[in-house]
Image (cartoon, rainbow, N blue to C red):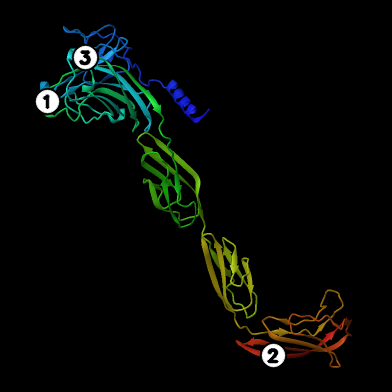
Amino acid sequence: MNFVRFFAFCLLSFSAQAQNLLGNPGFELYSQCPVNQSQITYCQQWDSAIGTADFYTCGYYAPSTIGPYGIPASGAGCIGLVSFPPYILSPTSWYGEAIKTNLPKTLIPGEKYELKIDAMINPMGGPGPAIDCYSLGLLFIKKSNNISFPVFGCSDANPQIRIGINELQSGNYQTFTRSFTADSCYDQLIIGLFCNANTLSNPCLQIAESDYIDIDNVSMIQTQNAPVVSYGFEGSDLKICAGDCISFSDTGSAPSYAWEWSFVGTNQVIGNQKTETAICYPNSGIFDVQLITTGECYSDTILKKEYINVAELPTVTIITDTSAYCTGEYKTLLAQSNEDVIWENGQTGSIRSVTKEGIYIVTASNQCGNAVDSIDVKYEKCDCYVYLPNSFSPNDDQTNDFYSIYYECVIENASLIIVNRWGEIIFQGDNPDQKWDGKFKGNDCEEGIYAVLLKYKGYSNGLLKQYSIKQAITLVR
């Protein structure tokens, strides 16, 4: 099926399905037969809006010496509307009747309709006027607006559809077809005689036109749906940091006139503008956002759960033992942080051991930035106490198998030499933590007396001094 045939098929399908939306369009249904004029209340689904319109059916027509009023275009029913010229009542009080009916569905803005109505000037009223001193109008309203029409005098009502009275023929029904696009959520239709720009002009006041209008066969068929509208909102940023401020905007296409925002976890819990700016999140977390939009014909609620993700700012603090440490002793630094950390020397991990004075810096980072802390490590120059054992027993019994020096401070430039009774150096080292296993060139040394010479630098009264200790030791197996 080509596009043209498909389009034509769609139009035919739509037309076939279209139906008249107005109840009792030909005024055929009634609660009881009228026996007099001004009995519109007997016509089902229609009632008076202004004045007291006349209802005709059951073979009843208003008696007259020159002919009947209320001649239907088809069937047995029709409505008669009368207009009185201003001069009869007062120089400016014009009277025109109107009827009303409730629409079976509330109109949606943007929907399009085709309206038809059969109308004529009753021949009892004579020929039509030379100019339009009023109009036959179709007015769509919302019942909730409680529009009030004066019985005598012109109102501010402006019908969406107007048919000039001089378009109507006397004694001859014509079918008038008009298109209409809903611009609000109307739920009631009023058909009647309305003032126009000429009504109170001098020519119309001089003519003093009085007419009787018969109407019949009113139809209202929807020809096009309303454009699809969307509802939604967006935040300017969805992943932010604690303390950041962002904005929110209604992104829907629906014609809203009121907004009700709900921002959880912010400095501004609610808002009432289409766009809300400077919405700040002081704390980290995942938060919901809700928007209720209201238009003339709708109210819509959108809740976006866990919509805004607020990350925590990085934090870091160095914690260490506050007791005094002597120069060279190991001091432990602990970096407490909500993120991984890196030290100024490139070392990672939260624990760091140091032995030197200086400023130590640690940094924690995430998408929200950097946090930095530092500590200035100081040492006390403690007096140095060194102890040299006078014996050891390298016999592999796991007790006193090695010879080493003992110290309770930091010593520098330590040199340990052990010689035998002949003055031969059998052990030498410059590390104060080194141990002698009682061997020389891989062989066990003999039991006996050996001499030890230790040279080192250590603090005394805050001053670094050179020390030398000589001592004899006994090797026992």
**Amino acid type indicated by mark 2:** Tyr
Dot 2 or dot 1, earlier in sequence: 1
How far apart are the two marked residues, 2 and 1, measured between alpha carbons? 132 Å
Judge left or right: residue 376 versus residue 131. right
Q: Which residue is mark 3?
A: 122
Q: Residue at point 38% right, 45% down?
A: 274
Question: In this rendering, is residue 135 above or below 285?
Answer: above
Q: Which residue is mark 1?
A: 205
- Would you say residue 92 is visible in this rendering? no
**Amino acid type indicated by mark 1:** Leu
Q: Residue at point 46% right, 26% down?
A: 8
Q: Which residue is mark 2?
A: 467
Crowdedness of circle 3 by 10 Å Cα count: few (<14), some, many (20+)? Answer: many
The secondary structure type at the circle numbered 1 is helix
Nearer to us of marks 3 and 2 is 3
Residue 137's quadrant in the figure? top left
Q: Of 313 and 450, which appears nearest the observer?
A: 313
Crowdedness of circle 1 by 10 Å Cα count: few (<14), some, many (20+)? Answer: some
Judge left or right: residue 348 versus residue 417. left
Residue 364's quadrant in the figure? bottom right
- In the rendered image, the quadrant that contains the C terminus is bottom right
Question: In this rendering, is residue 476 above or below 315?
Answer: below
Dot 3 or dot 2, earlier in sequence: 3
Q: Position of residue 363 (x, y in %)?
A: 56, 67
**Amino acid type indicated by mark 3:** Asn
The secondary structure type at the circle numbered 2 is strand
